[in-house]
Image (cartoon, rainbow, N blue to C red):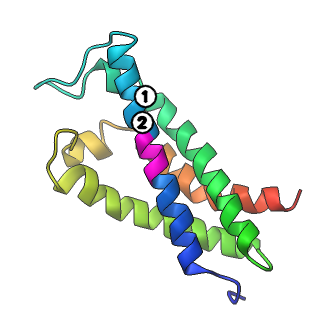
């Protein structure tokens, strides 16, 4: 049933997609601040430049994780819907765990509190996790075309 799973390739696709999505979000924020002259981060919050990018985050994720989901599913000898669902669940689980460390627990200029990340960032964070889960499934469906 799972003889075709290639965990190394799955992780490569996941991490490349995660890094690209993160970079796009950062560049979008920088664009908003420097080109569109939106307010930057200050002691009161992440700033208008970042806040205006939030509705775009699920879109970045569904596009990129679907592309990399397709690349992963296309690399399998016999991709199946079950494998795409399991891959999506693994990708989403890794992302949830990594986000706790990378955006909440490890302090840096863009880190957030639990409330800011998991409550104030709604509905975007939930839509992002659903997009990441759906990426390999969309990728699998594209392989059927």
Crowdedness of circle 1 by 10 Å Cα count: few (<14), some, many (20+)? some
Crowdedness of circle 2 by 10 Å Cα count: few (<14), some, many (20+)? some
Q: Residue 143 at x, y = what percent? A: 82, 61
Q: Which mark is residue 25?
A: 2
Query: Does residue 51 appear in this view?
Result: no
Residue at 69%, 90% in the rendered image? 3
Q: Is residue 106 above or below residue 90?
A: above
Q: Quadrant of the N terminus?
A: bottom right
| Residue that numbered label 1 is attached to | 28
Residues at marks 2 and 1 touching, judged by CB atoms closer than 8 Å: yes
Q: Quadrant of residue 132?
A: bottom right
Q: Is residue 112 above or below residue 144?
A: above
59 and 19: which is toward the camera? 19
Local SS, label 1: helix
Position of residue 70 in the picture relative to residue 43 (left or right): right
Position of residue 36 in the picture relative to residue 10 (left or right): left
Q: Quadrant of the C terminus?
A: bottom right
Q: Quadrant of residue 44?
A: top left
Q: Is residue 22 above or below residue 99?
A: above
Whether residue 76 appears in magenta in the rendering, the answer is: no
Between marks 2 and 1, how big is the CA–CA gap?
A: 5 Å
Region in magenta: 19-23
Can you name the residue that lies furthest to the left here? 43
Q: How many marks?
A: 2
Q: Main secondary structure of the magenta part?
A: helix
Query: Does residue 79 appear in this view?
Result: yes
Residue at 72%, 58% in the rendered image? 139
Q: Residue 56 at x, y = what percent? A: 50, 31
Local SS, label 2: helix
Position of residue 23 in the picture relative to residue 138 (left or right): left
Residue at 24%, 59% in the rendered image? 101
């Amino acid at each position: 049933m799972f003889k075709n799973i290639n965990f190394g390739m799955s992780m490569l696709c996941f991490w490349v997609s995660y890094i690209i999505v993160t970079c796009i979000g950062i560049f979008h924020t920088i664009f908003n601040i420097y080109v569109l002259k939106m307010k930057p981060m200050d002691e009161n919050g992440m700033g208008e430049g970042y806040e205006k990018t939030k509705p775009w985050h699920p879109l970045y994720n569904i596009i990129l994780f679907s592309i990399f989901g397709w690349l992963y599913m296309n690399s399998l000898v016999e991709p199946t819907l079950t494998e795409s669902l399991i891959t999506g669940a693994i990708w989403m689980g890794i992302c949830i765990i990594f986000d706790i460390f990378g955006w909440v627990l490890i302090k840096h200029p863009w880190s957030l509190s639990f409330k800011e990340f998991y409550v104030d960032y709604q509905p975007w964070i939930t839509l992002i996790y659903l997009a990441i889960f759906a990426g390999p499934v969309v990728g699998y469906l594209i392989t059927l075309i």
